[in-house]
Image (spheres, rainbow, N blue to C red):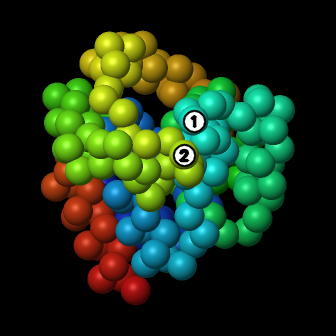
Amino acid sequence: MVAITDIKEAASLVSKASRIMVVGSSGAGKTTLSQALASHRNLEYFSIDRDVRWISGWTQREVGEQRRILEDIVCRERWLLDGSGPSTFELRLPRTDIVIWMRLPRVTCLIGVAKRVARNYGTVRPAMAAGCPEPLPNWDFLSYIWNFEKRHAPVFLRSFELYGPQVPIFQVKSRAQARELLDLIISAH
């Protein structure tokens, strides 16, 4: 794993990148940052949740269809992919120029989900598939966020090493750092 620790270096890499992955726990702010970056970098924005995984009624697409959709996306020259799902890192990482890992504290992520639910409950948010209205979070979803670092971060790290050892990874640790990264990228253009 090529860890980037300097935010200015990360902003410079993102400013030149044609293919960007944004990953992390639910509620970390992946979609907010992703949409802003895609807009400012003129990259085609794809949400794993909206464009790959879910169809109406919170039904998951068949795994083979999900893979076909992802294969079509990653073969393109310019994109930003918002979504975690390490089970597909082997498709995405080899084509990725940089990964932004939203690695915010779990309480921050839970607050992010609470705000998202308050804003969107019962309606379909823009980064979600049609027919999938924002639900109240269940225990499994809250547990996923609470235990993300312990259960899922190690899988991310192994997958980064296995499928993209040459891909630079910048870890965003706070909302303020996400804003700073975006500000640096905007000022570079």
Residue 122: x and y in percent read 35, 43
Q: Are marks 2 and 1 in contact (CB under 8 Å)?
A: yes
Residue 159: x and y in percent read 60, 27
Determine if residue 107 is in view: yes
Q: Residue at x 30, y 83 (%)?
A: 187
> 129 or 152, which lies in front?
129
From the image, tell me which residue sits under label 1.
57
- The quarter of the picture where residue 116 lies is top left
- The quarter of the picture where residue 179 lies is bottom left
Q: Is residue 49 above or below residue 159?
A: below
> 45 or 16, which lies in front?
45
From the image, tell me which residue sits under label 2.
131
Residue 164: x and y in percent read 65, 40
Determine if residue 148 is in view: no
Q: Residue at x 61, y 41 (%)?
A: 56
Left or right: 155, with 136 as reference point: right
Q: Residue at x 50, y 26 (%)?
A: 157
